[in-house]
Image (spheres, rainbow, N blue to C red):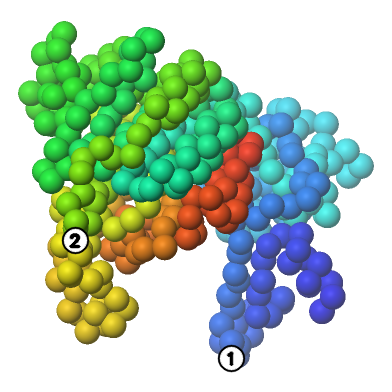
Amino acid sequence: MGEFVELEAQDGVRMPWNVLPGSKQESSNCVVPVSAIYTPIKPFPNMPVLPYSPLRCRTCRSVLNPFCTVDFSAKIWVCPFCFQRNQFPPHYASISDDNLPAELFSQYTTIEFEDPQMISSSAASPMIFMFVVDTCMIEEEMTFLKSALSQAIELLHENSLVGLITFGTLVHVHELGFGEITKTYVFKGSKDVSKEQLLEQMGFFLKKPKPSTGVIAGAKDGLSADSISRFLLPASQCEFTLNSVLEELQKDPWPVPPGQRASRCTSTALSVAACLLGACVPGSGARILAFIGGPSTEGLGAIVSKNLSEPIRSHKDLDKDSAPHYHKAVKFYEGLSKQLVHQGHVLDLFACALDQVGVAELKVAVEKTGGLVVLAESFGHSVFKNSLRCIFQSGGHDLGLSSK
Ligand SMILES: [Zn+2]
């Protein structure tokens, strides 16, 4: 048994039986079906990394491995899955019993191939982060959040592209590439914005005619690099602007009448972020990082009305299906999740408040896009600060996901 535990640690594979049936008869006699649980992207200490691409089977595309039968004199290997005989390519000509390539070493049942071509193409496409920051919170929380964000920005890889959207009653899209002066585009919080409206209002096609048909999708559809770099800039170029915008960031200035909740248009801000990324960088690994400090009360994803006399829905209300805003909000976030999946973008949620922020409604968009949720009671709490630091520790390339 110990041997299999060791193998599990080495390969990340667990099976009910560690022996495969050798014949059809044995297979039909099996009471427990043959199955395996595999942990993808499991971190292995001292993982051998080979600086070339793997050899693949001609028929089933499986990879040359220690379980293949190799005929050294004929320079042929037999695929253990489909029994296809495959010729070794010329650069494997010197292969012999005592001159094995690393992928045939019996102890290397898990190895990593690093194709130099793939690496250069992934280096060409940097990570993209769109910060979406709630401003409807008390001064103390604002200070905590601002300091955590500026620390995170310091940790960003210099090539990572960064954008900033802040929201409260209104949505502010910050044009970070506008030199020394800060410039923002403002959207009404109560009204959902489509991608077409956003392209129009933000002057993406000022200099040239907008394509009349087809999906408007980034540089391929004639969107110039200049217009994209107004909103998404390499961290090394916008660190100063970003920090000064964050420094000057104030609590949402719109007055909150007594007996009312702050007007917080979380859903509209997320929708604007998704549309902006969809217009600028569709199909590239971008993440929306949403920092939210309370319930959404404005827009299609509102979870409660502004009137404080209406309590926020509880678990009981959700169970009894008597939360009045729930279905409308979920419908909105389902739509948003479809848009994000289509664009290949991820939504991460940092919900830090004693109050509810509406994770029940929002979660569909996080789950469908493979995002992260961090819940804490305050932006000053160590859970939030440490989680954010962990995400950016290695320049945003270690999100617990494969960067390759
Ligand atoms: Zn095969």
Q: Is residue 337 visible?
A: yes
Residue at x 32% of width, y 66% of height: 360
Q: Residues within 10 Å of mark 2 (few under 14, many from 20)?
A: few
Find residue 181 and report its image quarter: top left
Q: Earlier in the sequence, mark 1 or mark 2?
A: 1
Q: Which residue is mark 2?
A: 259
In the rendered image of this protein, does residue 60 appear above or below residue 116? below
In the rendered image of this protein, does residue 212 appear above or below residue 33? above
Q: Position of residue 307 (x, y in %)?
A: 16, 62
Q: Nearer the viewer, residue 327 or 265?
A: 265
Q: Quadrant of the N terminus?
A: bottom right
Q: Position of residue 194 (x, y in %)?
A: 14, 38
- Amino acid type for the residue under numbered disc 2: Gly
Residue at x 53% of width, y 18% of height: 236
Q: Which residue is mark 1?
A: 31
Residue at x 47% of width, y 60% of height: 377
193 left or right of 10 in image: left
Residue at x 7% of width, y 23% of height: 212
